[in-house]
Amino acid sequence: MTYKFEIMTQAQAEEIAHNWHYDGEYSFYDMVADEEDLAEFLDCKARDNSMFAVMMDTELIGFFSVSQAAANVYDIGLGMRPDLTGNGRGTEFLHVGMEFVQARFTVDKFTLSVATFNQRAIKVYRKVGFRDMDTFMQDTNGDTYEFLRMVYECE
């Protein structure tokens, strides 16, 4: 598959925010599940140049966020269109996203945070080479949830 990364447009943000709905416990990741996250996601100034739409041909299939956490350390966030999740595509999607970031920046480490209930994603992250760092509690979606912070050290 050939992925293309582009700065997310307002139309793409609206599409993700209003039309992407995940099943079961993964509905936690629906953008409308948290008003603050939704407002930030839809704010083009907040997204700036850190949020990328992931395209396959002309089809929006995911998003990838990048923010510098420290010198040569980049925090990433990602999401795939709901109908594409759980089908074994996560490893490739993550690898391609990391390669995209490494082509733009000097990266020594990647970090990310994931809700601890999301064992499906954690399995993908560990398979790619991310290691567990620590857990923390975060208020989101109207409650408090445990998150796992993970790190990947580039060779």
Image (tube, helix red, strand yellow):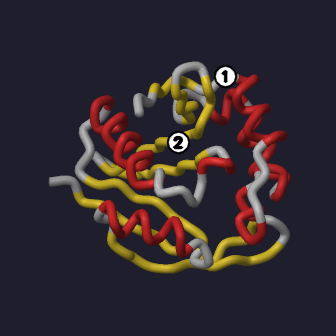
Task: Write the residue at 68% across / 50% down.
Answer: 82
Residue at mark 1: 9
Q: Where does residue 126 sit, x and y in percent of width and height?
A: 36, 69
The image quarter containing residue 144 is bottom right
Q: Quadrant of the C terminus?
A: bottom left
Amino acid type at circle 2 is Ser
Q: Is disc 2 surrounded by few (<14), some (14 to 19) or many (20+) residues within 10 Å? A: many
Q: CA distance from mark 2 to mark 1?
A: 13 Å
Q: Is residue 63 left or right of residue 110?
A: right
Q: What residue does disc 2 label?
A: 65
Q: Does label 2 or label 1 sit earlier along the sequence?
A: 1
Residue at point 73%, 42% (across, down): 40
Q: Is residue 38 left or right of residue 148?
A: right
| Position of residue 113 in the picture relative to residue 138 (left or right) | left
Residue at left 44%, top 71%? 123
The N terminus, quarter of image = top left
